[in-house]
Amino acid sequence: MAWSTQQLVRDASRQAMWAVPNAEHRPPRTFDDPEHGTFVPRWGTLALLKLAVQGRAVDLTPVRIVLRDVARMPLSPEVDEELNETLVDALRRGDLNRAQAVLQDGERAPYDVVEVHLVAEDGARLVVGRYGGFDITEDEPVDALLDAARSILSIS
Amino acid sequence: MSEEVKGLIFDAVKVTIVAVISFPFASWLEDTFPDLPDWLLFAIPAFLIALLVSFIWLKLTSTAHLRARWHQVDDLAVERAQIVVKLDSATGEAETGFWLSVHREQAAGLGKLALRLAVRAGLRVRVTVLHTSMSLTPEHVARDPAEDRVIPGNDCSIEFVLTPPPPGMGAVWASTRVNFQGLTPRPPADWTVDYAVTSSTAFGRLCGRLVKVDARAASVIENWR
């Protein structure tokens, strides 16, 4: 399975969003270009959760959420598995309130979302990170991702 | 025009109003109490009218106050007067996040009315860390996350959209957990935090002139490790 790395960018007034290749795996923020009025989306936990919810409308199903704890460290496998089960279920049902509540509850809470793993109908996989960087196994679902991303442009 | 000059002009206007209104009252006092000394004929109405004018002026020019508060996520008990952001030089990520909240504080007279009207016209509170290359991301929004209440800026800023009804005095109106992200490692730097009200409508901006945002936290320290 060949992965390609790309980056979502938007205009300064949040009217348009598009994808650009990122073969060099540059950090997302290096795509900010104030002179030309292009910026990467400022996606944190809430935006990534919303993106996962919006993905359902374009047949992108959330399958895994990568989390960090209050100290920005990875979670233990047990806690991660337990949280993911509840979180993915809430996101597939479109229940943002429940998803947010899950991330506030726990010994090392609050938890941050750093990546959302999505699967397209044809089995293509996408891994979308904070600030709109993403890896993808095929190019077909990029349009679907853009549709979902454009639906949250106002908070990007 | 500087604030001092404005204040001077407003004081002159107030004195003029007091003088103009005092004269008819002085005549009435002279007719009613002919034995009063001359200086009292002017002093009594001038004092009473000055008191009245000052009271009305206070009501007309009073501002509504909002307060922005910062709390470190792992220590919610303490409101931060200085925000220290420790950044990982490998990833640019901050070691700890913060809760940033906007509270309603006192509002009276025209300021109270202006606040209500401004909120209906789409009042926003913008918190900006000036001149830094860091950025801010909203992580978790208190109240209903389905509403787009918190909007990240192109610079290092966050905008809160205040929605009616106003909460009680001192209560949280809008809040979010935020994380900083650094761009390039650099020596420690101290950045000023700016708090402002804004609106997408001209009427909202006009009413917003009587709404002030106070905060204890005046600066953010960018500290790379």
Image (cartoon, coloured by chain):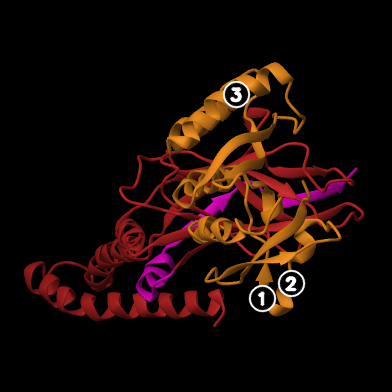
Chain colours: A orange, B red
Residue B15 seen in this snapshot: yes
Side of A4 where B90 appears, left or right:
right
Query: Which of the two residues, B18 or A70, is positioned nearer the viewer here?
Result: A70
Q: Is residue A79 above or below residue B64?
A: above
Instruction: Name the residue: 60% across, 27% down.
Output: A84
Residue B164: x percent and y percent?
32, 51
Q: Position of residue A83 (x, y in %)?
A: 60, 24
Residue A108 visible in the shown view: no
- Nearer to us of marks 3 and 2 is 3
Disc 3 residue type? Leu
Quadrant in the rendering for residue A133:
bottom right
- Count of numbered circles on the image: 3
Q: Nearer the viewer, mark 1 or mark 3?
A: 3
**CA gap, disc 3 and disc 2:** 37 Å
Cα distance, mark 1 to mark 3? Answer: 38 Å
Q: In the image, what residue occupies the spot 48% across and 44% down?
A: A53
- Residue at 62 percent across and 29 percent down: it is A110
Question: What's the residue type where badge 1 is placed?
Answer: Gly
Q: Which label is found at residue A83?
A: 3
Q: Chain of mark 1?
A: A
Is B224 magenta? The answer is yes
A99 w.r.t. B161: above or below: above
Q: Which residue is labeled 1 in the image?
A: A37
Question: Secondary structure under badge 1?
Answer: loop
Residue holding disc 2: A33
B13 and A70: which one is in front? A70
Instruction: Read off the magenta span.
Output: B200-225
Marks 2 and 1 sit apart, C-alpha to C-alpha, by 6 Å
Residue A134, image x and y in percent?
70, 52
Q: Residue at x 67, y 23 (%)?
A: A80
